[in-house]
Image (cartoon, rainbow, N blue to C red):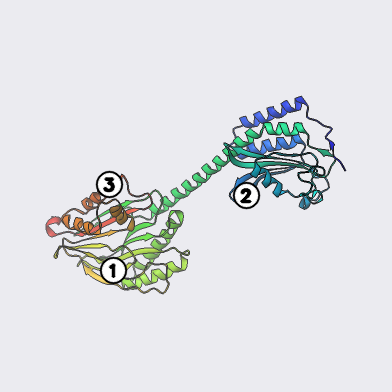
Amino acid sequence: MELVKDSSAITPQEKLDFLLRISDHLQQREENWGNNLAAIVDEIITISGADQGYLFRCENAGLVPVLQRTNNAGNIPQHEIMIPMHILNRSLQENQVFFVTDTQTDDRFRNILSVAAFHLSSFICIPISNHHQKEGLLYLQRLDDKTSFQRDHLEIIRSVVPTLELLMENTKMQAVEQERGRIQREMQMARDVQRSLIPDAIPQYKGWKTAVCWQPAFEVGGDFYDFIPISDHLLGLVIADVSDKGMPAALFMALARTIMRAVVGGQTGSAADMITRANTLIHRDAREEMFVTLFLGLLDLENGSLTYVNAGHNPPLLYDGKNDRVVQLKPTGMAMGIDEQAKYEQKMVRIDEGDFLFLYTDGALDAVIRNKVFDEKELHAFIRRHRNADPLMIVNLLRKKICEENSAPSSQDDLTMLVWKRITTAEAL
């Protein structure tokens, strides 16, 4: 059966009204460009008399439907209506418009297209590109009837293709901006979580001085430190670095800090017992491949003894004034959250008058070495040179040197340093 031309040709007035409606849609200040795009596709469906219309977007995986409109499918069940994707892909690859008035007589498709299977009588397929970049494709089809698309349908649709190109580009840019905004909001929430877990103030104890540098990265990491009172003269010192970035790191950081406060604060038992219990709890709740490196020191504020466990963390540096040397408090067990059965060893050192403890995370050490401020050996020499300096001066000098060498620490890492010094009788006066 040969199709006949549509008796309702597009009149000049209909063309003018169509273009005016398109102009009106473009002047609408929609918060979502996708609404304008949908409205214009609806106008195209109406003016062309298409039974169905589809707008596709190009992605790495191929053509992805953005809009689908059904105007009149007659008595054909919806599940039987199909799209000849091989033709759409060919149109896109060849950057060629396919205008088929009769699928039964068109030699280009008669042998490769089963009209009965697709219920197609006539179709228009127009690639959409922007600055030679393939953006998508507009596809219109008429189903089993006796009418076909006419040349004036094709021409008026092609006249608004540049508008579709613009709207698709704007929609894509808007989606990128919305995703960027979502990421920024998530990052701000992560920063808020991270900041809420950092102590508001540094505790002051007779005979001791403390200074902290905590400079969060642009991309939220998982550095944190804490001071956990255990008794009148015993204090828990914690510094830790959580794996991962962003909100997952912030939430895992909150989990680790909460668990550490629960097992250390007001509890009895050794430092090794505390870390073992904390590791078990963290491992149970840790997402796969997430872990935390952590140093716990139980400091006796009266006699200066420090019992510690280093769970895979960067070795804190203890300046030993009596021997004028720097001692590394090396790891005594693996990072927490990796192995529920991990064993931890505790060790003890003494912080005498004039000695101080320098704790840091890998972001601080990496910034020092990467920016060529010092290598590790020179960092030890720096600490020895400033053995008599105030703790605040030590952290400020290090931060200044890091920033001078590279304008700012790496945006990928937090910068966390802590100096805990036992002052001499002369300094206390």
Image location (x, y in percent) of residue 85: 70, 49
Considering depth in this image, is 320 or 58 the residue closer to the camera?
58
Q: Earlier in the sequence, mark 3 or mark 1?
A: 1
The residue that appears at 40% across and 62% down in the rendered structure is 256
Please give the label number shown on residue 405: 3
Mark 2 lies on a secondary structure that is: strand
The residue that appears at 67% across and 36% down in the rendered structure is 39
Q: Earlier in the sequence, mark 2 or mark 1?
A: 2
Q: Earlier in the sequence, mark 2 or mark 3?
A: 2
Please give the label number shown on residue 308: 1
Contact (CB < 8 A) between labels 3 and 1? no
Measure how far apart labels 3 and 1 are at the Cα level: 34 Å
Considering depth in this image, is 166 or 91 the residue closer to the camera?
91
Mark 1 lies on a secondary structure that is: strand
Q: The residue under label 2 is which amino acid type? A: Gly
Q: Judge whether residue 336 can be spotted in this image.
A: yes
Contact (CB < 8 A) between labels 2 and 1? no
Mark 3 lies on a secondary structure that is: helix
